[in-house]
Image: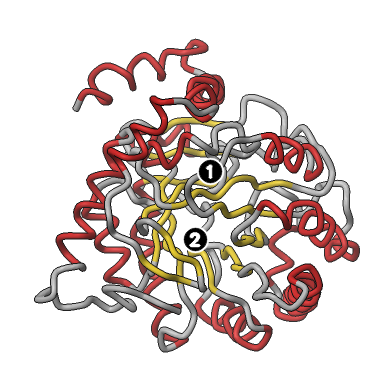
Amino acid sequence: MLYQKLARPVLFRVGRGDAETAHETTLRWLSRLSAGGRARDLLIKANQAKASVKVCGIRFPNPIGLAAGMDKHGQAIGAWPALGFGFAEIGTVTAQAQPGNPKPRVYRMPASQGLVNRMGFNNGGAQALAERLAAAPPVNCPLGISIGKSKATPLEAAVEDYLTSMRVLYPFADYFAVNVSSPNTPGLRQLQDAEALRALLHALKVEGARFAAGREPHPVLVKIAPDLTESAIGQLLEVCLDTGVAGVIATNTTIGRDGVDAADEAVAAQPGGMSGRPLGPISREIVRFVHRETGGRLPIIGSGGIMTPDDAEAMFEAGASLVQIYTGLIYSGPSLVRRSVRRYRRRFRKPSAAPGRGPLPNPTS
């Protein structure tokens, strides 16, 4: 493919091969497209295939979305629908501005088609993101905002930290993703424990209802780690159902290193969360488990290891209502989005197509 033969080699050489520099360069290019104009309008018209689904009360033009982490600062929100995405999730953003962990902090694993990152929620803070979104042109697709805990905030004050981000960003979101599962903020994953999570989700639900002022509040979804035991995931799902969470995102990056090619072992030894192809089988199994445990009552966004249309199809079959792409975009380019949408339409939109394990072909949860 053109991207893999021409564009990817250039990007992988940017900044002497530094992955984060290449990422920032890509976002600068895309931010120009995001600003609007005839080119963006034509691309949206050309790439937005008709494959709409309704999930969590939101109508998505298609079920293939951008995962959080690619556009942390909301620099290129208008570009994502032009590349064919049916929705985009930006962030993770925190209440306080923070630089994240020291560089270098992003590493490629080319033989494994994976990444290791320990970014640490680097962002300008919720207020800065709100100002950028207020000045941005229309997004032309649903926008999710991933919110996390500021590193400087102690765990006992985490609830107010998340609430601050929700309050500031509520006018700009179509849904909120609650990130309690990144491995790169010390102690954050403790918020997946049942009682801590219950307190956080209850507070967010109350605050969302207050902002909605009698209208339907924005859906809140919980992003879970792939490193939890089935027992721990089961407890987390009970809390989600009890507190009326709209859905879950499965999964975040993993601290495990299963499936890494021998050629990438030195990079894999770096601390941080791993994404990409090695994560795919793990994430699919968790999606399958969540769907089975909840009887399909809790919509799932499948995220992790979507590198090909086959991977997207397998994630839908496992029980996902929507899927998200990040690392696959880096290795396969934007054609992956369009090809995955076409596969979805062929596989799941035909009247004769047998539905998979998930709530398909047209989930309306």
Kindly check if marks 1 and 2 are in contact, taking CB atoms under 8 A apart as contact: no
Identify the mark at residue 326; answer none if there is no mark.
none
Say above or below: 331 vs 292.
above
Could you say which disc has been placed on residue 139 in the image? 1
Between 106 and 147, the one lying in front of the other is: 147
Up-down relation of residue 79 to residue 257 (above or below)? above
Residue with the most extreme front position: 38
Q: Circle 2 sits on which residue?
A: 251
The answer to whether residue 263 of the structure is visible from this angle is: no
208 sits to left or right of 254: right
Q: Quadrant of residue 238?
A: bottom right
Q: Nearer the viewer, residue 83 or 332?
A: 83
Place residue 209 in its image quadrant.
bottom right
- The relative height of residue 6 versus residue 301 in the rendered view (above or below) is above
In the image, residue 164 lies at what x, y percent?
84, 56
Indicate the quadrant containing the N terminus: top left, top right, bottom left or bottom right.
top left
User: Which residue shows up at 31% across the image and 73% down it?
Assistant: 362
The local secondary structure at tag 1 comes to: loop
Which of the pair 22/345 is nearer the observer? 345
- CA separation, marks 1 and 2? 25 Å
Q: Which corner quadrant holds the C terminus?
A: bottom left
User: Which amino acid, by three-letter code, is at mark 1?
Assistant: Val
Relative depth, front residue between 360 and 211:
211
Judged from the image, the secondary structure of the residue bearing numbered disc 2 is loop
* Residue 310, visible in the rendered structure: yes
Q: Position of residue 13 (x, y in %)?
A: 42, 13
Quick check: 71 left or right of 190?
left
Name which residue lies at 38% across and 56% down: 61
Sequence-wise, the earlier of marks 1 and 2 is 1
